[in-house]
Amino acid sequence: MLDTHGRQYLDPLINGSAHILSRMGIRPDQVTWLAFLAGIASAMMILPGLRLLSVFLLWVSGFLDTLDGALARETRRSSSWGTVLDITFDRLVELALIICLALTDHHIWPAMILLLSGIIFSMTIFLTVGALSEKASSKSFYYQAGLMERTEGFIFFSIMILFRNIRVPVTFLFSTLIIITGFQRLFEARRLFRK
């Protein structure tokens, strides 16, 4: 929801940064890798309890994740491989965060199982609709907006990292909202493909 409706306010910063990187000769795939490495580093910082550093690296990863697409459009280097790499790395960062959170708190395991289930359910619909739809977007495939998008996920992960005492209920809320988003996308797909 925030990605879809709030992006217009961040576009000047993102596009300006992409322009600077373009002039420096930085390639979109390099930014994709940097976003991935920052995300994995964020997850790793959970293990020794470096929570503020973890959250900082998570948001650096998120910013770079938006920047690679803008840079690809700026340099006219958009590619299907770049899209695959971007989406794959996003899921691997989420998985690393979930694993590292679970390793530091065994009470959260049932909530994490539900969270993983919700992500698999929602992303299956999202990616299948994107692959089957003839519509296109600036993201190289049909992008289904939803209640829970990447920014909302980062907000929830940040809360889970910073506030261990409320981690379990926050994770259950996060999971519930992702599952609702999955059904939202499923119903939209039904309308889309019945036309």
Image (spheres, rainbow, N blue to C red):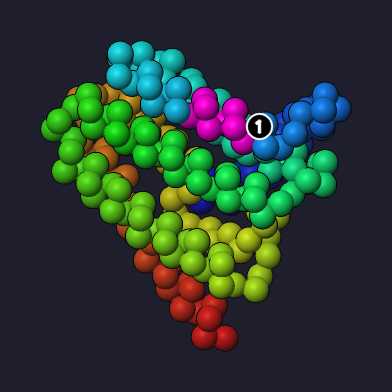
Looking at the image, which residue is at 27% across and 38% down?
Answer: 170
- Give the percent coordinates (x, y) of residue 187: 43, 73
Inspect the magenta stretch and tell me whether residue 36 lies in it. yes
Vertical arrangement, residue 182 with respect to residue 25, above or below? below
In depth, the one of 26 and 138 nearer the eye is: 26
Looking at the image, which residue is at 75% across and 43% down?
Answer: 72
The answer to which image quadrant residue 43 occupies is top left
- Give the percent coordinates (x, y) of residue 151: 50, 40
Work out which quarter of the rendered image holds the C terminus and state it.
bottom right
Question: Does the image show residue 21?
Answer: yes
Element assignment for label 1: helix
The residue segment tinted magenta is 32-39
In depth, the one of 41 and 65 nearer the eye is: 41
Question: Does the image show residue 176?
Answer: no
Amino acid type assigned to the residue bearing label 1 in the image: Val
Inspect the magenta stretch and tell me whether residue 40 lies in it. no
**Type of secondary structure dominating the magenta stretch:** helix
In depth, the one of 135 and 3 nearer the eye is: 135
The answer to which image quadrant residue 41 occupies is top left
